[in-house]
Amino acid sequence: MKKMIIFLLCAFSASWASADLLHLNKGDEINGTILKLDAKTVVMNVAGAEKTFSRKDVLKLQFVKEYTGGRAEPLKEAVVAQLLSAPPTPEDYPNDGYLTVLRDVLIDIKPDKSYTVTRRAVRYVLRERGKSPSSYLSYNYLPDIQKADIDYAYSVTDSSVTYLTDISVMEGSPYLGYPSYDRVKLAKFAIPNVQIGSVLDSQYHYTTVYRSTYPFFETVAFRFFEPGKICRLTVTAPNGFTLAYKEFNMPKDRIFSLEKRGDRTVYSWTLHDVPSYKDEPNTPPFMRYAPHVALSLGDSWESLRREFEPLVRARLNITPAISARAAELAAGKASAAEKAEAIYNWVAAEIKYQPVGMDEYSYLPKDSGEIFDARTGNALDKPFLLYAMLTAAGLEPEFAYAQSKYSLFADNLPNIRQFDYAECLLELDGRTLALAPLDDRHRYNELISILQGAPALRVLGGPGKPALLTNPDPPADDQATLETEDYVLGREGGLSGEITLRVSGEEQASMRGYKNYKKEDLDKAMESYVHSLHPQARLKDYKIENLPDLSKDLLFRVSYGVKGYAMTAGRYMILKLPGLEYSAGNVSQTERELPMFWYSRSRTSGTVTVKLPRGFRLYHVPQDLKASAAGQSFSASYKAGKGELVFTQELRRDRLQIEPADYLKYKSFKESLAQFTENWIVLEK
């Protein structure tokens, strides 16, 4: 039996290139290739020389796989050889860490709709900071429907080739903390011996078996945060297949071809000399601005809806426990809105959210009874349980899949894999609400910002309605912060007062996160808040009403004092308006390449009242300001009353995206606000 194990080890190690490790009892580690192994000796090729070791001196053997891809002479490979003969210089790319000389993606679709994606990248390291990101690669796959592997990976440093070995490859689950959704696998590897001037060549692939619930859909980007010389996508499909695609943000000089080669149709996109992106404030999510192509096989939205409706409905299991809990929550509620809110609040708070995407687990929900019993659910399953409970309560919800704002929607590619969230649609008080109880911070009528205005696909309910819809897109008034500030200014310049905030939408959801704080941590957070208002501020008291109650809006109050807030000079007292501070930090650039982006509209308005010290009158008050640009507006005014100064303001954001052409207008707008906050108020004795 022992001889058989030795034979199998030798036969296995001979099937691929290896760089084996021999560990000796005295602590030495020998790197080489095992040539012979028997009961008495181990023969290795070490640096070109054959060496023999006694088995009694050997602690252990480690057979190491090298990912060579069968390449006997990698230095003669065309792209690598050309790069080695004429390498780029750091001066050619003064702001970049590495250059991607070739990014090649090949997608091969089979007649049975299974497909293989092969990704190759050849890179050149320009600077120290480019070493790590250029050599580190990773990919995800679903092991029950996908097979993935590394074809080859190696570095060329000073004409010396170093292959990736399985020692540098790690594979595991990124979601071990969420065992009920632990399906996807993550493989990651680091190409060894990478230095400045190294050439890196790597390729991996994954093959996906066709499933109607996980159909072919791929998006391939052509530009990233490091430059590229050639970025290419090639798709081959059997003749007669309807390959649908949509280009997003592709430049005019992109090269596209479509041709038939025997029984295959070949689609190809190529970009040359693609510059790197630079970090800019408030950029949109990457797939909203990067040039990319989305690909799918032909279908229609209505047929997709017809296909998924029975599959999803089969998972709808309104168990006695679900019915009983829905009836309990709806009991005593007079209106449909009150019933819906109570059920939504329960699902939001009691079903623990699992941050595992639909693409990493399933596009079909779990059985609703299973979700209810497990008390866990992801972005598909939590809304599906809500649908089951609303239905059990006698309401008539619809169930839909939605695409978040993280990417752009291809309306000509009917495919379930475009969606990443689910929601319930309900007609309440004459308006359509999209309910997505993903966390316990958003109220039932406050849709999370990434789904506001998002495209969605009706799957259950809504007979006679079109398959596609657009989610409600709340105006700025629904994302409001109302501030009321009352202060008393002392004769020595000390200031004390109270701030009251009433918030809605994303501002309220953000503030409701305080409910998870311990008392001492919340105290520290409030101390930090008032300190941000003024370096010498000291917290007096605070209160957040309705913090754990998702059925009520928050009311936040904080009182503080600042000793010596105003400066005194003779008979004058000089101060700035408390809490009034607008920054122009996000418009420091003179121009932009990318749009500016926000996830939700907003409105901040309020009144600041300062009671003046006895014996002082207003000597100088800043001029009022009214400004607007690129869908943003601001207005502010001062009004002198009897013994007090009243300031009112409103800042609105009505547009979510500002194009580069409008950037300078927005820059001027923000700078005028920042300058306005630098104005001084002067009192005279």
Image (tube, rainbow, N blue to C red):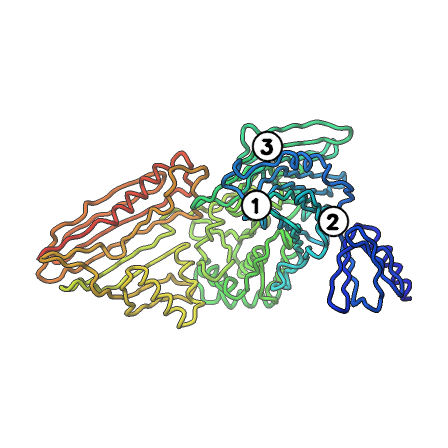
Q: What type is the residue that disc 1 sits on?
A: Leu
Q: Is residue 669 left or right of residue 448?
A: left
- Mark on residue 389? none
Q: Which residue is mark 2?
A: 67
Residue pictured at 32% horizontal, 51% vertical: 604
Give amino acid for label 2.
Tyr
Mark 2: few, some, or many residues within 10 Å (few <14, many ≥20)? many
Callout 1: SS: strand
Answer with mark 1 or mark 2, whichever residue precedes in sequence. Answer: 2
Q: Residue at x 65, y 57 (%)?
A: 315
Measure the alpha-carbon separation of dots 3 and 1: 33 Å
Q: Is residue 341 above or below residue 288?
A: below
Amino acid type, callout 3 = Leu
- Residue 160 placed where, x, y %? 70, 45
- Secondary structure of residue under mark 2: loop
Q: Are marks 1 and 2 in contact (CB under 8 Å)?
A: no
Percent of width and height locating residue 468: 55, 42
Q: Residues within 10 Å of mark 1 (few under 14, many from 20)?
A: many
Of the numbered discs 3 and 1, the one sitting upstream in the chain is 3
- Image depth: mark 1 or mark 2 in front: 2
Whether the residues at callouts 3 and 1 have beta carbons within 8 Å, the answer is: no
- The location of residue 283, given as percent across then percent down, is 46, 44
Can residue 328 be spotted in the picture? yes
State whether residue 411 appears in this view: no
Whole-percent x, y for residue 228 in the image: 58, 37
Which residue has dot 1 on it? 457
Position of residue 642 in the picture relative to residue 81 (left or right) = left
Residue placed under numbered mark 3 in the picture: 271
Q: Nearer the viewer, residue 346 or 159?
A: 159
